[in-house]
Image: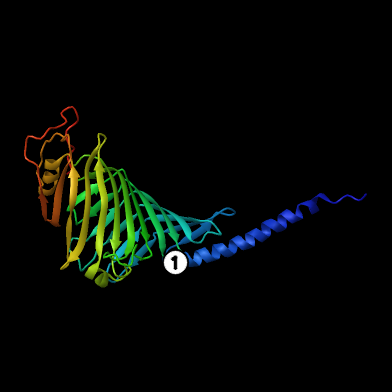
Amino acid sequence: MKRIPLWLTVVPLILGVAGYWWFWSGYKDGFREQIAAVFPGSPVTIGGFPYRLEAEVGSPRLESRGDVPATASADNAILNRGPWQPDLTIVRSAEPRVSGRIPALANSTLSIAAPSSETSLHLDQARRIARLSTVFDKPRVTLALLGLPLTATKLEVHFRETTGRSAEAWSPSLPQRAQVVLEGEGVKAAAGAPLKLAADIRVTGPTRLIDYARWASKGTVEIHALTLADTTDEVLRLDATMVASGGVPRLTGTLVTSCPQTVRAALTGERVSEQRLRLPVTLSLSGSPGAWQLGNLPEAGRATRAQQPACPALR
């Protein structure tokens, strides 16, 4: 019986690898074209064979103009994608910087800078953002709405654009257009104590968030259960609605806290020492940046939890 040469037994393997390389190279070229369209002029190096597409992009920068000018940049970024998963991309960035503002709205400037971040971008079939999630490591945040610089050990920002369909046709609320979920560890406002942050923010409006002027006419920002907590327990919980009225953000809501004087001091810039109340109180919060109004402050003499640590400074 004639034996088959050993080299013939590896031919199918060689052909398979060569064929896969041909397919992978096609995906690589398509990935390069997409990156070049998003980051024109940035140097791009792509590798990752055989399991993934990994692109290193030098000095990437995104910029949008129009009603809401914004920029996102970094010193360096590494993009990872499965060859057959064009709708999901993971981005690791060095020295990321994000900034934006709404020229027609006062106190709308936002900027975030961090040593590093990791982002996952998932697009739907219509190429809209199904989910955009970013984890910033040790970020520095400037938010004009608060008027205070923020720092954190970690900050997660999750964004998704929703379909825009109301729950009920007869509902007086406008369709939800977007959702933002925040989670933060070691969050500090100026010289305040490090706290844990959680928030669920939903944006409603008559149109997608690409037309600010039309959105601002009827749109709202719904803050659902924004909470701050220390290692002892929850310090405050805010539920509120914000609208753009006459080019100024105006907020109305309720705030539940066991540290009412600490909350008041955070709004006025004072410093107080306060023991936590045994029973939380509900306060009203309204107004605009620089003119916040806090109502229903309790009188002195309420029972406190003297055995617990004092209320943490909020600024």
Along the viewing direction, whichever of 41 and 129 lies nearer the viewer: 129
Visible in this render: residue 193?
A: yes
**Residue placed furthest toward the left:** 300
> Is 178 or 147 nearer to us in this picture?
178
**Which residue appears at 25% of the width and 46% of the height?**
227
Image point (44%, 59%), residue name:
122
Residue found farthest to the right: 1
Residue at screen point 37% across, 59% down: 160
- Compared to residue 166, the image places residue 233 above or below, namely above
Indicate left or right for 249 with 82 as reference: left
- Colour mode? rainbow
Residue of label 1: 127
Q: Quadrant of residue 102?
A: bottom left
Q: Quadrant of the C terminus?
A: top left
Q: Secondary structure at mark 1?
A: loop
**Side of 276 where 195 appears, left or right:** right
| Percent coordinates x, y for residue 11 in the rendering | 76, 55
Q: Residue furthest top?
A: 307
Total tally of numbered discs in the picture: 1
x, y (%) of residue 206?
29, 70
Percent from the top left, x then y, of residue 304?
14, 32
Is residue 41 toward the left or the right of residue 183 in the image? right
261 relative to 68, above or below = above
* 282 vs 235, nearest the viewer: 282
Question: Closer to the camera, 171 or 43?
Answer: 171
Going by the numbered disc 1, the residue's amino acid type is Arg
Q: In x, y percent, where is residue 180?
A: 32, 56
Q: Specify the quadrant of the image occupied by residue 235.
A: top left
Asked if one can make out residue 190 in the rendered structure from this viewpoint, the answer is: no
Near mark 1 (Cα within 10 A), the count class, few <14, some 14-19 or many ≥20, is: few
